[in-house]
Amino acid sequence: MAKDEKKAPEQEKLLPRLRRKYAWVDHVIRANEAFTERYGNHYAAAITYFSVLSLFPLLMVGFSIAGIILHGNQAVLDQIQHGITKSAPAGLGDFLNQIVKAALSAGAGTGIVGLVIGLYSGIGWMTNLRDALTAQWGQEKKPQPLVSGTLKDLLRLVGLGLALVVSFGLTAAGSGVGKTLLHLVGLDNQGWAVFLLRLATIVLGLLANTLVFLWVIARLPRERVNARSAVKGAIMAAIGFEILKQITTIYLGFTAGSQSTVLFGPILGLLFFSNLVSRFLLFVTAWTATAKENMVAVVEPPAPVVIQPRITVNRGPGLGLTAGAFGAGALLALLGRRRP
């Protein structure tokens, strides 16, 4: 029993020692504490809910507008569609592809009602995302005017949509252009050339995702932050995003063999993937916010001043000495009277 009691304090001292020795351990622990204190899990759940709720309306509206703008340029639409399908986990590609095809076939037939529903759900999703990122940066949530706040969220939603379209388009175009170039120079059957093309496509995809995550982490909070300090977080988010895609693919592979998940497999996979990405994005934001260059030094207030009355007693002659002096004075006065 005594040995167990001795081991407990040693284990408690292990973590502080690791934090003092390794700066990255201390940083991760600070980020986790900030993520928990700022309700990261609750915000991630809200983002997941609004992501699934607004996915179909946003794709419908986005591809309806893209179909009108890019009418007659089917190659560009195919590249964007291929980029979205490729950016999703393997088990969700077919599901998203069906949604995109439905949106493209709808075209202008989405109508005013579909546009309003898509914008309403999208603005709700963007509002929750911005509030979550603001909280992870440790910024105070200030009340937003209804009209101007809604317009800002709408502009941020459009900006994020354009950034994602550019990211998907670059990834798909890079792969297509690379294959065309290999075919022109006669290296499309060479294994090393195909390997280099795949490696270049991965690097291009990571670069595009890094730019998107950099914009999300540094520009979506209610108050702007230093974009330079968010670069490391954006790189970390881009790499983690690819890892989470592989985890979701493995998860969907396990659930695909179950008859109970045949009907709801894509929806469950979408929920699982969206929640993973939401938690990871908020944690990376907390990790960026708790970096030493972003932490605001807190000046401790001075100790409270205690006002106490101070009484100083000046000691004079004692009672006996006073009585003796009084008696001596009286005796001298009496003698003075008798002398005449």
Image (spheres, grey):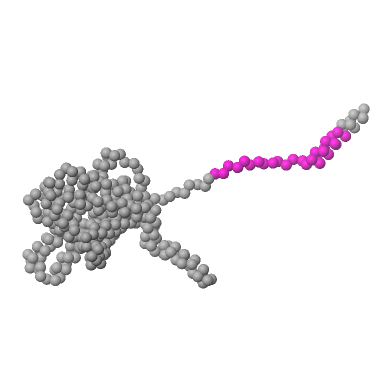
The quarter of the picture where residue 310 lies is top right
What residue is rendered at 13% in x and 54% in y? 101
Residue that sits furthest to the front in the current view: 260
In the picture, measured across the screen, residue 337 lies left or right of residue 154, that is right
In the picture, measured across the screen, residue 325 lies left or right of residue 91, that is right
Considering the image in quadrants, where does the C terminus appear? top right
The vertical placement of 112 against 183, above or below, is above
Q: Which residues are magenta?
A: 305-331
What residue is rendered at 28% in x and 54% in y? 48
The vertical placement of 305 against 198, above or below, is above
Residue 107 spot, x, y in % from top left: 12, 48
Q: How many marks?
A: 0
Is residue 59 something one can see in this rendering? yes
Residue 16 spot, x, y in % from top left: 44, 63
Residue that sits furthest to the top in the current view: 340
Is residue 215 something one can see in this rendering? no
Residue 81 spot, x, y in % from top left: 15, 56
Magenta span has 242? no
Q: Nearer the viewer, residue 180 or 113?
A: 113
Q: Nearer the viewer, residue 294 or 338?
A: 294
In the picture, measured across the screen, residue 21 lies left or right of residue 335, that is left
Residue 116 spot, x, y in % from top left: 20, 43
The quarter of the picture where residue 92 lies is bottom left
Magenta span has 317? yes
The quarter of the picture where residue 321 lies is top right
What residue is rendered at 17% in x and 65% in y? 198
What residue is rendered at 7% in x and 51% in y? 72
